[in-house]
Image: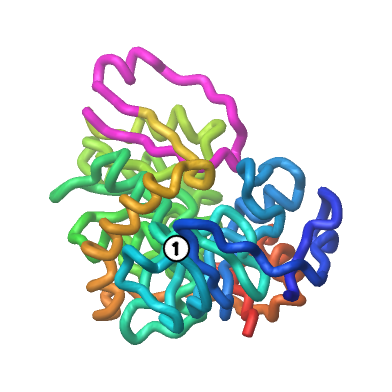
Amino acid sequence: MRAIEITQPGPADVLKLCERPMPVVKAGEVLIKVHAAGVNRPDVFQRQGSYAPPPGASDIPGLEVAGEIVDGDLDYTTLDIGDHVCALVQGGGYAEYVVAPIQQVLPVPKGWSMLEAASIPENYFTVWSNVFDRAQLTAGETLLVQGGSSGIGVTAIQLAAAMGHRVFATAGSDDKVAACMKLGAERGINYKTEDFATVVKSLTNDRGVDVILDMVAGDYLPREVSCLADDGRLAIIATLGGGKATLDMAQVLRRRLTITGSTLRPRSAEFKGAIAKKLKERVWPMLAERKIKPVIHTVFPLEQAAAAHALMESSSHVGKIMLQVI
């Protein structure tokens, strides 16, 4: 099969088209003929040599795909050979075939194309796990999304807004701020020209927000703590701004704040399967009704994966960067 491999840690051009053996299907897995795959920030980190695949996972990058089931262990599922599905995988998505644990495989939402469906898994699993499971965003609460124009950001904005929450989002340009508001954010905040903590406090009568989804960390943390409401929760999913920060722990104690973080890739298939069940029950109906829409910025053919990574690193996109495999 054709695949994209990382020839050595380095810049985008270390990604090269190659021929690889077909993956071997094990018990509890299905083999998917890939039509499209999503490009995500962890793929970039893996290419740079700072985010190794979990033990036993493919060294081929790619964490989400959509395609057709062509083989596998289907004894205890409602899925069958030939079904169109999307899946979260531990690696191997930049290829013509990939294996996925059956728990992490979901049907393509009604009315969605394969390309659109491939944009779902990584972002939706991540947002659901962190915003709704870990941070426990509940009815009547407010959410601040850092990096609102990213794939994660546009997912969090749309999902929370569709569920009736007030959502605020940061972005790095006025055009991106406008895009966030078009997707459902009540207020977009240009972090280059505005202080998000000051804006959030003004929008909430100094109360602050209940939940923050953060992929920046670093020097954002003190300001995030300052603009959390009492009993607020901060969910960190990446450290693009650095892995260290100084916090006012007295605020954390006095106002009963929760700071949590997680990475999804190394978690078990059982853990991810539990998220998949919640998504199918709570989110798939909204996707089928187009209450939440795909936001795809650019599509590259598989062989141009290096160009896709270069675009990702430029941060000039809004939404998802995709690879068309078939």
Q: Residues within 10 Å of mark 1 (few under 14, many from 20)?
A: many
Which quadrant of the figure contains the N terminus? bottom right
Residue range of the region highlighted in magenta in the rendering:
231-258
Q: Describe residue 117's horizontal placement relative to residue 250 as left or right.
A: right
Which residue is more in the foreground, 78 or 261? 78
Residue that numbered label 1 is attached to: 121
Q: Residue at x 69, y 61 (%)?
A: 314
Q: Quick check: is 246 in the magenta stretch?
A: yes
For residue 104, say whether it is visible: yes
Which residue is more in the foreground, 154 or 271? 271
Which quadrant of the figure contains the C terminus? bottom right
Give the image location of residue 79, x and y in percent. 35, 73
Q: Describe residue 163's horizontal placement relative to residue 318 as left or right.
A: left
Element type at mark 1: helix
Please say if 243 is above or below 125: above
For residue 201, say whether it is visible: no
Q: Describe residue 247's horizontal placement relative to residue 5 as left or right.
A: left
Which residue is more in the foreground, 226 or 291? 291
Q: Residue at x 22, y 63 (%)?
A: 281
Query: How did the renderer colour the structure?
Result: rainbow
Give the image location of residue 107, x and y in percent. 36, 74
Which amino acid type is marked by label 1? Answer: Pro
Q: Residue at x 32, y 39 (%)?
A: 134
For the image, the number of numbered tags is: 1
Quadrant of residue 240 within the rendered picture: top right
Give the image location of residue 128, x and y in percent. 33, 52
Q: Quick check: is 196 in the magenta stretch?
A: no
